[in-house]
Amino acid sequence: MDKSIIKASDLSLVYKDGTKAVNKLNIEINPGDLVYITGPSGSGKTSFLKLLMGIEFPTGGSLNVLGVDIKKGRKGRIQKMRRQIGPIFQEFKLIEGRTALENVCMGMRFFGIRPSKIKKQAMEALIRVGLESKIHTKVENLSWGQAQRVAIARAVVRKPKLLLADEPTGNLDHENAVSMLQLLGSFCDSNTAVVITTHATHLIENQKNAIYVHVDKGEFSIKTGKAGIAAIS
Amino acid sequence: MKSLFYNMGYFIRELFKTIRLSALSNFFSFIGTSLILLLFGLILISWWIGDNLVSSLKDEAQISAYFSPGMEQEQMHKLVDEIASMDGVTTARYIDTEMAYEENKRLLGDEADILELFDDNPFESYIDIRINLDDMDSVISRVTSLQGIDYVRDNRDVLAQLKSLVNAIKLIGSVVALAVGITTIIIISHMIRQGIYNNREQINTLWLLGAPSWFIGFPFVLAGILLTLLGGFAAVGLIVLMLEKGYAQLSGYLMFLPFPSVSELKQNISYIIIVISAGLGLFGSLFGLSSIKKD
């Protein structure tokens, strides 16, 4: 049985205006993989994440995410697949007017879990990202960095098989950006693959077990381990 | 199912949030729905009363057959028996001249003094025939053709007019029922669409997090049902008030008119309006949700 979380073969995405966002990408991501996708703004990183989320659909090749053929685009199956993904959106997509705790709970409400258990797990997740003092604060009253941590807590509380983080270092200073990448990397385990996009190549640590993907104008180059970091730096 | 049960509190909070977000617009939707359901309720009551009236008059339908001059008493009674055995005839009763005089005296009421002007009893004996309204034409034709019957007096015209009036109310009622249904569905589906628009960011986030469609749509369906139910209750309240006032005004005449009892009317109309408003709320909400998905 195929245990891969993501399997792309000759995957392509060409927008209606002719822009090639992804060009014939071949990649396989398995549980426990930590994947950094780097490249300049507009290179195709976010488009690739959109494909993984089933927001965009391949225009060529094939893409299988958590056992779902994205190209077929069956709504019900895509929704089921999304429940196994922990997305951290670039703009966070937190729900205003709600507290940090309510936002984190929101990601699990449709999992058929008792509300008391959801609340307990959400609090643990918020504590893990260092927001124990902001649990009952409305998200519009949080700083940018704190809001980002709420988004992370909402993603990881679901115990996802695939954690996707889109430009998590965007507005952070060097020190915070490094600790953010370390925090996200810490969620990678034998059940979970973590995919992080960033344009700040210099922030990425040289990790032996990581996969480094560089993308520019839809062209992806993939390297692993120490050689990989050297190739994209 | 577990998610539905566990999230009931969340759905109820979301439902009130949806209503609160466009409070004024939803208030107008509520007023509109109430008035539409009130109109529907009034038409339904008219229909009901009219139908009741016709049914009662059907049971009471009566014709009078007058004897040819110079008939013997025995022959008259034979004719009464013959008519009583006809299909469509409920009862046939011989009314002699004295009984006819008393009956007319009763009908004339305060004006009965006029009868004293006559030296002799001006009324003839006749046969009072109670019939099934649907068989009226055939009974009249058979009775008229009997030997010994001079002429037959009937209230066919009045009954025909009453029947056509009730049919017209039924027709108007059907049109109003259709209009009420369509209008309520439009109002509620518009309200749902507006609610979805106001909550679009939250819906989009939930969608991206993998929330199933029913989970996203359920609070909106609840909001639609609640709003139409409230409209239904308001309409029922107004109808009950109007019925009580109306029946109080007609209290003097009610004993002579075959109207249904006010308590029966109030109870039936309340059930019907509440069930219909809940159904329309559900249908309108689902229609609103489905039309959004197509966009």
Image (tube, rainbow, N blue to C red):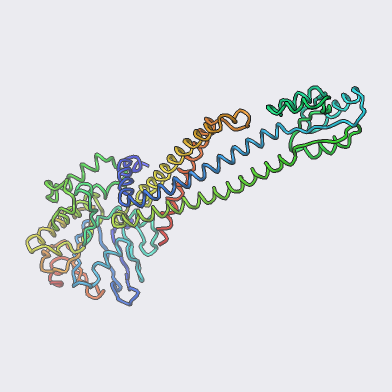
- Residue at the spot x=53%, y=42% of the render? B42
Q: Position of residue A36 (x, y in %)?
A: 18, 64
Displayed quadrant of residue B16:
top left
Q: Is residue A67 above or below residue A42?
A: above
Q: Position of residue B98 (x, y in %)?
A: 80, 22
User: In the image, B208: left or right of A41?
Assistant: right
Locate the C terminus of chain A by quadrant.
bottom left
Q: Is residue B42 above or below residue B175?
A: above
User: In the image, B178: left or right of B51?
Assistant: left
Please tell me which residue lies in front, A61 or A110: A110
- Which residue in the rendered view is the most extreme toward the bottom? A18
Please tell me which residue lies in front, B103 or B19: B103
Locate the N terminus of chain A by quadrant.
bottom left
Q: Position of residue A48 (x, y in %)?
A: 27, 67
User: In the image, B183: left or right of A6?
Assistant: right
- Residue at the spot x=42%, y=42% of the render? B229
Q: Is residue B134 above or below residue B14?
A: above
Please tell me which residue lies in front, A5 or B143: B143
